[in-house]
Image: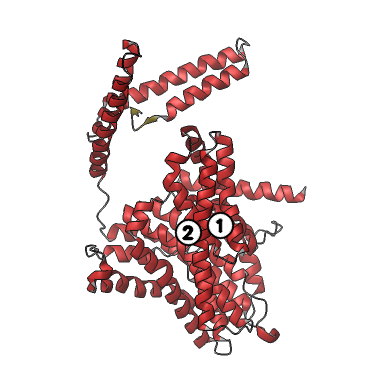
Amino acid sequence: MEALVEAVLFLTVAILGTALARRFGLLSPILLVFAGLGLSLVPGFPDIRLHPEVVLAGILPPLLYVAAVETSVPAFRRNLRPILLLAVGLVLFTAVLVGVVVHLLLPELPLAICLAFGAVVAPPDAIAATAVARRVGLPRRVVTILEGESLVNDATALVLLRVATAAALGAAVQVGEVVVEVVVAAGGGILVGAAGALVIGLAHRRTSDPVLDNALSLLTPFLVALVAELIGASSVVAVVVAGLALGHRLPVLMSAASRLQMTAFWNLVKFLLEGVVFLLVGLQLRDVVQALEPPWTRVALVTGVVLLTVLVGRFVWVFPAAYLVRLAPRFAGGEPRPPVGLPVVVSWAGMRGVVTLAAALSLPLTLAGGATYPRELFIWTALAVIMVTLVVQGTTLPAVARRSNLPPDDPAADVLAGAAVQQEATRAAEQRLAAAGDELPPAVRERLRQSVRNRALGAWELLGGDEETPSQAYARLRREMIEAEREVFRRARDDGRIAEEVLVRAYRDLDLEESLLRHGSAE
């Protein structure tokens, strides 16, 4: 019973924190971290500890999967070079830089454990990047790069952490072994993810039941991650590959009803898990601080220097990667020279999150031969990096983005492109209607023709100004009419004139119609 009370209390705080953040236009990750910090200091509040396995095996796979499903594969492919430069190159650079700096500060420690700690603080967090980047309203290309980085960088960091930890525990790690480890982790993850996408895709094709489709979708990231771990491959890479492949083919794998329900289902999963994750980060403060040991000057020095290294190191890597690579046209890919604001924003968007803390908690208790090391100091420093990057960078990123003067996405261009394709779709629909011959009554034929033409007109109406368009007026009044219809069915059910099942069917049809009213047009 006590565990149930704690779980309900925990979820309630996470939901209320996220709701308050949305109500007042705040960044929910930051508010929830502060909420967790406050609760960790309340006497008598349950001691909820973060276990690495829970995060890496229970929370990370579904969040990575849904982020990958929602990522545009063509956009990901177009930005593959900057994504890999950040997700692989920057992670390795940061890990080595932090490892060397910590080894210089604490020369009595083996370099291997210092590199392991570097791998812990190197990767920006997938959840934080997605939550903050979209909330800030960054240009689409910047969001794609940051999300792509956050999808892949965990795999780089976790593989490096595994190798460095093995060396710190006394294993003889040769260069060839490291290469084999990387190839197995990355290559195996790609193969498992691709195979998983193929098998799950076939299963989706064979069912049109939205409930089964959603259950299968929820199972996918855990199943793929489990198979990858069993063969020693990267579960992160496997989940991301499966999510990208399935998300790209979603329109041909699922029915319309399944896609609608899946969107709502995963929105709920993300809402709950993201709230829980950031609240968990804040709640670890009490235990981490209590485990710290003096001298406090060493604690302050290591924490400050690592923070500075993480923040500055990202700038040191991003700017040369953005500009020097263009000295070689072969690697530039014909891309134009980016404005200065782009590397500035990308450099400042390096928020760390729960994966960093989970990785820190997974550090070994002792080193080779039972030697001790300041593990608690490493965990504290990792938590400090999370807090500072989330709070400082997360809160100032909107101002940095505004001052960077990045060219915003052109909504008119999106509308024009969408309207042009809508015209093609309209012609295809009219050709299909014409192919029906005389099998349709004239009234039905005219109704269908008018429906597709209204959709085409609605696409062009989006180019208009602030005045209400005919389609927007239609959508507004139709929603009011739908609510009036609902009220009639509600009263009939309450008066006993219809059964509950009749009300449910009527509400389902009305809800689906209302869900099709987008941007003031009936789709």
Residue type at mark 2? Ala
Seen in the picture, residue 319 relative to 230 is either above or below; the reply is below
In percent of width and height, residue 511 lies at 48, 26
480 horizontally vs 7: left or right: left
| Residue closest to the eye, 276 or 413 | 413
Seen in the picture, residue 460 relative to 100 is either above or below; the reply is above
78 horizontally vs 280: left or right: left
| Residue closest to the eye, 335 or 22 | 335
The residue wearing badge 1 is: 60
Q: How packed is label 2: few (under 14 Cα within 10 Å), some, or many (20 or more)?
A: many
Seen in the picture, residue 419 relative to 117 is either above or below; the reply is above
User: In the image as oriented, which residue stretches furthest toward the right?
Assistant: 1
Q: Quadrant of the C terminus?
A: top left
Residue type at mark 1? Leu
The answer to which image quadrant residue 442 occupies is top left
User: In the image as oriented, which residue stretches furthest toward the bottom?
Assistant: 108
The answer to which image quadrant residue 435 occupies is top left
For the question of whether residue 119 can be seen, the reply is yes
Do tag 1 and tag 2 residues touch (Cβ < 8 Å)?
A: yes
In percent of width and height, residue 106 lies at 55, 87
- Please report the residue visible at 54 percent of the width from the left and 84 percent of the height from the top: 174
The residue wearing badge 2 is: 126
Mark 1 secondary-structure assignment: helix
451 horizontally vs 222: left or right: left
Mark 2 secondary-structure assignment: helix
The answer to which image quadrant residue 324 occupies is bottom left
- Please report the residue visible at 25 percent of the width from the left and 28 percent of the height from the top: 457
